[in-house]
Amino acid sequence: MTSETGKEHNMEQCKVYSLSTCSHCKSCKKLLGECGVEYEFTDVDLLPDNDRSEVLDEIKRLTSRCAFPTVIIGDKVIVGFKEKEIREALGV
């Protein structure tokens, strides 16, 4: 897991499950950075096999499918790069 820090905001915890080569995942991370959101991300495709299986199981538990990016903001789960939904969940 890696953390990115933007400007200081007092927001709910934000986590992104992504793929390192996915353009939608990159756009999602860019949006969060532009909004000054501190977030954690995991590039699932770069994880060792055992860790990858655990993370994929977690994503399936949260979303009932496996799609990227999967964004968790507080208790809200957003699947895909849906800028409007992400902004609404962040309150920006």
Image (cartoon, rainbow, N blue to C red):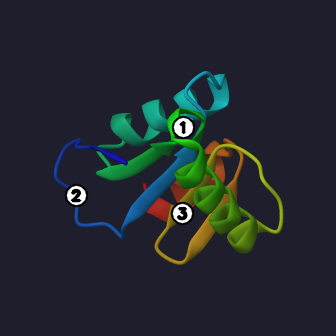
- Amino acid carrying label 1: it is Cys
Total marks in image: 3
Q: Which residue is mark 1?
A: 28
Q: Nearer the viewer, residue 45 or 77?
A: 45
> Residue farthest to the bottom?
75
Task: Quarter of the image for the C terminus: give it.
Answer: bottom left
Label 2, label 3: how many angstroms apart (C-alpha)? 16 Å
Q: Residue at x 59, y 58 (%)?
A: 55
Q: Residue at x 68, y 46 (%)?
A: 82
Q: Nearer the viewer, residue 15 or 32?
A: 15
- The crowd level at tag 3 (other Cα within 10 Å; few <14, some 14-19, many 20+) is many
> Residue farthest to the front?
50
> Residue farthest to the left?
8
Q: Which residue is mark 2?
A: 9
Q: Is residue 17 above or below residue 12?
A: above
- Amino acid carrying label 3: it is Ile
Measured as percent of width and height from the top left, residue 57 is found at: 69, 65
> Residue farthest to the right?
65
Label 1, label 2: how many angstroms apart (C-alpha)? 18 Å
Q: Which residue is mark 3?
A: 72
Q: Is residue 7 above or below residue 21?
A: below
Measured as percent of width and height from the top left, residue 76 is found at: 59, 72
Occupied quadrant, residue 68: top right
Nearest to N terminus: mark 1 or mark 2? 2
Label 3, label 1: how many angstroms apart (C-alpha)? 12 Å
Q: Residue at x 57, y 53 (%)?
A: 50
Q: Nearer the viewer, residue 5 or 34?
A: 5
Measured as percent of width and height from the top left, residue 41 is found at: 43, 47
Describe the element under mark 2 as helix, strand or loop.
loop
Measured as percent of width and height from the top left, residue 18 is found at: 58, 41
